[in-house]
């Protein structure tokens, strides 16, 4: 039985329009402004995250630290990412984990702020790929007779774990 | 098939093909690439987003961790305002769990920790009128190379960093660190074998006088940490009183033989408590608990059978301006 995890990554930046995205955009930027001071020089601060990272490897922790500001919004999703639905349109992408990454940002310019959020599904049984869809089931304990979901292959959706 | 028919059929297929991109486009509207004229998205059955503070803002920072209950009280005083309590400062703290692990992303590319539980033992509070930020946690364990410690990052109300520091723990026989790490019933398995003591710790080895906390309590009842941190906060305005709220002096003679005097200046009548702790953080006595009038007072301590060694005296002053605490170290010969 083939088991997989699916991952879906979305990007939030100043052009994002959803309310949920905007809250995360603003709050993660505020959090970045606070937390970057742990790693940045007071006298001669690096303006962008990428510059800071190349100077101080420890700034890598900022991905996680900034995710704290997004966490309460991710919790509001209650484990389902609604923007990715199955083929029927009434089941949504289930996730148990997520990871936030800072694409780049600038302490003097909020419009440069850009983050990614990757949602990771629980372990799924991969039954088949039919018509450019992943036919999967969350019933990993079963050997046969599955309730299935079909997720269309699409940009930003990938298999991130594979087990035979 | 004749060439003419083939072309006709092909055109038919092409006609179909044209419809596909518009379908894709319609689907895209539900994604992040919402077009300028797309139908207002209904957030289909999605959540109703509400503004919520960062997950760090909470009193209880235990999350899914277990261990001995631990209350952390941190007072922030402002060196730019005569050491008065600093209200409205943002205090971030983080420490490891009983096994020495921090909440953070794992080493692998994929986050293995569940999203509801990966924020443990990190907290954020804003100081109250007494400059106090209080957290509910569990007693931290230790990891190789470091003495037990708590990380602290203090910001002013606008989020500008004022100080990054660490809080040290009293150690040695009978200290909370020793008692907690011996408590296998609470899941602390490491004991003190291989522990890095403050003297050899690369952060604290240059002296811990300013970073050392006082800890009271027991394994059964939980421990309470009290610590005062001084930051260079906002300076006083021109019209603000620049008179110190209180001034605690060093005792004399120090070291003491039979008795010693501690000078204490207060600018209004106050209730004054003086507590004596040993270096393990154990409360030895409360020799003074009275109301004193404003001005300079001399608090006289008698030896009363104290064994020789270092002690910390902590003075708490309560008056109309608030509650203020300060500690100093003294030696008994």
Image: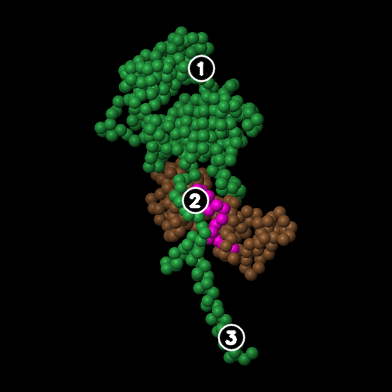
Chain colours: A brown, B green
Does the CB distance between marks 1 and 2 fall below 8 Å? no
The mark that comes first in sequence, 3 or 1, is 3
Q: Is residue B23 above or below residue A73?
A: below
Residue B309's x, y, as percent? 51, 15
Element on which disc 3 rests: helix
Q: Is residue B205 magenta?
A: no
Within 10 Å of the Cα at label 3, are there few (<14), some (14-19), or many (20+) other Cα atoms?
A: few
B36 relative position to A97: left or right: left
Figure quadrant of the N terminus of chain B = bottom right
Camera-nearest label, 3 or 2: 2
Residue A36's x, y, as percent? 45, 45
Mark 1 lies on residue: B284
Residue A128's x, y, as percent? 68, 64
Label 1, label 2: how many angstroms apart (C-alpha)? Answer: 48 Å
**Boundaries of the magenta span:** A70-86
Mark 2 lies on residue: A73
């Amino acid at each position: 039985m083939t088991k997989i995890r699916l991952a879906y990554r979305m990007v939030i930046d100043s052009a994002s329009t959803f309310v949920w995205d905007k809250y995360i955009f603003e709050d993660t930027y505020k959090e970045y402004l606070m937390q970057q001071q742990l790693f940045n020089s007071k006298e001669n601060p690096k303006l962008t995250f990428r510059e800071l990272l190349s100077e101080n490897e420890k700034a890598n922790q900022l991905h996680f630290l900034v995710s704290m500001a997004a966490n309460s919004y991710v919790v509001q999703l209650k484990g389902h990412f609604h923007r990715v639905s199955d083929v029927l349109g009434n089941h949504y992408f289930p996730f148990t984990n997520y990871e936030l990454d800072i694409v780049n940002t600038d302490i003097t310019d909020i419009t440069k702020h850009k983050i990614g959020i990757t949602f990771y599904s629980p372990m799924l049984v991969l039954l088949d790929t039919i018509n450019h869809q992943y036919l999967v089931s969350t019933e990993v304990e079963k050997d046969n007779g599955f309730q299935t979901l079909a997720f269309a292959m699409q940009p930003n959706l990938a298999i991130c774990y594979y087990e035979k | 098939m004749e060439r003419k028919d083939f072309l006709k059929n092909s055109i038919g297929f092409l006609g179909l093909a044209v419809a596909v991109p518009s379908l894709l486009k319609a689907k895209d509207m539900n994604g992040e690439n919402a077009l300028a004229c797309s139908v207002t998205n209904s957030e289909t059955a999605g959540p109703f987003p509400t503004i919520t503070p960062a997950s760090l803002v909470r009193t209880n920072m235990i999350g899914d961790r277990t261990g001995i209950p631990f209350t952390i009280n941190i007072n922030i005083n402002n060196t730019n305002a005569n050491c008065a309590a600093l209200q409205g400062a943002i205090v971030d703290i983080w420490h490891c769990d009983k096994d020495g692990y921090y909440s953070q992303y794992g080493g692998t590319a994929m986050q293995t920790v569940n999203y509801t539980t990966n924020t443990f033992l990190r907290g954020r509070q804003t100081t109250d009128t007494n400059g106090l930020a209080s957290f509910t946690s569990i007693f931290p364990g230790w990891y190789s190379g470091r003495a037990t410690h708590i990380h602290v990052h203090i910001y002013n109300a606008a989020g500008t960093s004022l100080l990054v520091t660490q809080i040290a723990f009293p150690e040695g026989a009978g200290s909370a660190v020793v008692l907690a790490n011996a408590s296998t019933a609470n899941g602390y398995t490491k004991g003190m074998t291989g522990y890095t003591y403050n003297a050899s710790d690369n952060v604290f080895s240059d002296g811990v006088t300013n970073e050392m906390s006082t800890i009271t309590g027991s394994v059964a009842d939980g421990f309470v940490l009290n610590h005062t941190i001084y930051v260079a906060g906002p300076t006083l305005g021109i019209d603000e009183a620049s008179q110190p709220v209180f001034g605690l002096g060093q005792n004399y003679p120090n070291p003491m033989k039979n008795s010693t005097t501690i000078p204490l200046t207060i600018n209004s009548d106050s209730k004054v408590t003086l507590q004596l702790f040993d270096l393990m953080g154990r409360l030895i006595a409360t020799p003074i608990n009275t109301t004193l009038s404003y001005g300079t007072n001399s608090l006289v301590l008698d030896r009363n059978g104290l064994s020789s060694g270092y002690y910390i005296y902590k003075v708490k002053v309560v008056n109309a301006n608030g509650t203020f605490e300060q500690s100093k170290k003294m030696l008994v010969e």
